[in-house]
Image (cartoon, grey):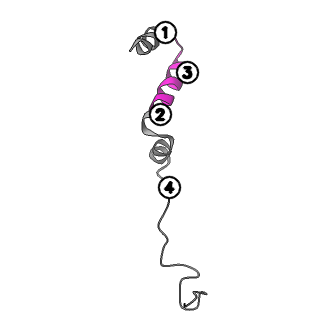
Amino acid sequence: MEKINELVQKDMTRKEFLTTVGFGLATIFGFSAILKLLTGKSFGQQQASSYGYGNGAYGGRKNA
């Protein structure tokens, strides 16, 4: 609690404030969630599609 009071009372520029808030949000929500929010893309595992090159009868699928 003392660290929060120190941070609130500290004089800082706008750039320092935005940097501090950005790192705080990244810590709370995680960097991947923030990147997903900003870009609209997911960076986790994605499910493989059953469509596309290599997935058809002539695409090289091996029958076991």
Upstream in sequence: badge 2 or badge 4: 2
Tell me which amino acid carries mark 1.
Lys
Q: Nearer the viewer, residue 60 or 16?
A: 60
Tell me which amino acid carries mark 3.
Lys
* SS of the residue under disc 4: loop
Comparing labels 3 and 4, the label whose residue is closer to the camera: 4
Circle 2 residue = 27
- Crowd tier of the residue under label 1, counting other residues whose Cα lies within 10 Å: few below 14, some 14–19, many 20 or above: few
- Residue 52 in magenta? no
Q: Residue at x 50, y 60 (%)?
A: 45
* SS of the residue under disc 2: helix
Mark 4 and mark 2 in contact (Cβ < 8 Å)? Answer: no
- Marks 1 and 3 sit apart, C-alpha to C-alpha, by 14 Å
Does 18 appear above or below 59?
above
Q: Which mark is residue 44?
A: 4
Circle 1 residue = 10
Q: Residue at x 58, y 88 (%)?
A: 62
Q: Residue at x 50, y 45 (%)?
A: 32
Q: Residue at x 43, y 38 (%)?
A: 29
Does 17 appear above or below 23?
above
Comparing labels 3 and 2, the label whose residue is closer to the camera: 2
- Say which quadrant the N terminus sits in: top left
Tell me which amino acid carries mark 2.
Thr
From the top left corner, tell me how far across and down residue 8 is, in percent.
42, 12
Comparing labels 2 and 1, the label whose residue is closer to the camera: 2
Which residues are drawn in magenta?
11-26
Mark 2 and mark 3 in contact (Cβ < 8 Å)? Answer: no
Upstream in sequence: badge 1 or badge 4: 1
- Say which quadrant the C terminus sits in: bottom right
Q: Which mark is residue 15?
A: 3
Does 38 appear above or below 41?
above
Upstream in sequence: badge 2 or badge 1: 1
